[in-house]
Amino acid sequence: MKLLRWVGPSLLAVCALVPAASAQINIVPVISGNQLTAQIQLVGGISADLTITFEQVVGLNANALVLSASVVDPTDPALLSRLPAGGLVTIPSGFPVVLHIEPTSSSSLSFSGIYKLSLHTANLTFAPAFRLFRGPAGGALADMTGSLDMGSVRAGGSGPGYSDFLIVVDARVVDAVITAKFDALQSTLTANSGSMPTSVFNDLQTKLNNARTLYNGGSYAASITAVTTFSDTVKNQSGTAIPDVWQANSSLVNVAGMLRSAADTLKYSLTVRANQPG
């Protein structure tokens, strides 16, 4: 589990006042049951509310995770190189923040299934192209968006583990995004086929093939339903046929969480496509 690092918009005004390197802060979490919340307050009036809700969790306390947020330079070549190639994914200027989360060395945090992460900031006004991206610390960042609410931006998504997070503006054609997400889900399923019975893998493969076939044929609503069926099957098989536990400072692979979170963000993009004309 990696530290949650949030990168936001192009920081134009803030960068003129404060160097990005000086704007990192540690975040104090508040724990209530299976939920973690935190307020992020950065230079230049940049702020956000973070919420992480677990399906099932053990060892969630104030010392389980280290959280930090940094104001960043949205033109930093090293940061931009972590985004999809082509220059169509950029960092919005109103919220130039990277959020990073990782377990402490003594953390006993363990959870099964997925978490739901929501980042709400009044520094951005809703625009359809906002997305929530995630990636390993220092590694490639990819779309994890599962929801995007109107008004001030509340971007959300699900996941099986932690990493760097940031809000971006994604101007890519949605069909290209959908194809990439189908490929990513297929790759995750194939790579973890050995962790589940052959019959379960074959069933999931059939369902995924059906969802892609429906999408390729322009049946977007039916494809969304098929992806939902895929995800529901994974959930039903979790813990018995499919490993579904993430544990801090261990090598356990939460296969079910990876499959469900990949299906969740695919479903979001399919919904965007279904609501477009043509």
Image (spheres, rainbow, N blue to C red):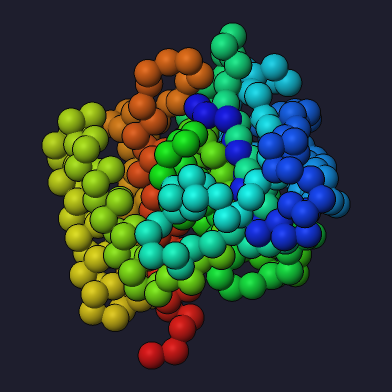
Judged from this view, the residue extending furthest toward the top is 106
Q: Nearer the viewer, residue 222 or 93?
A: 93
- Can you give x and y, in whole percent of width and height, for residue 58 in the image? 59, 20
Of the 4 image quadrants, the one containing the C terminus is: bottom left
Residue at (59, 9) in percent of width and height = 106
Residue at (73, 43) in percent of width and height = 19
Tell me if residue 147 can be seen: no
- Can you give x and y, in whole percent of width and height, for residue 6 in the image? 63, 44
Position of residue 91 in the picture relative to residue 143 (left or right): right
- Above/below status of 210 relative to 117: below
Position of residue 31 in the picture relative to residue 135 (left or right): right
Tell me if residue 172 can be seen: yes
- Above/below status of 105 relative to 238: above
Q: For residue 98, what is the image quadrant?
A: top right
Q: Nearer the viewer, residue 59 or 2?
A: 2
- Can you give x and y, in whole percent of width and height, for residue 78 in the image? 48, 45
Residue at (57, 55) in percent of width and height = 75
Q: How many marks?
A: 0
Residue at (73, 69) in percent of width and height = 125
Judged from this view, the residue extending furthest toward the right is 45
- Above/below status of 153 relative to 239: below
- Above/below status of 96 relative to 165: below
- Can you give x and y, in whole percent of width and height, for residue 177 in the image? 37, 65
Q: For residue 55, what is the image quadrant?
A: top right
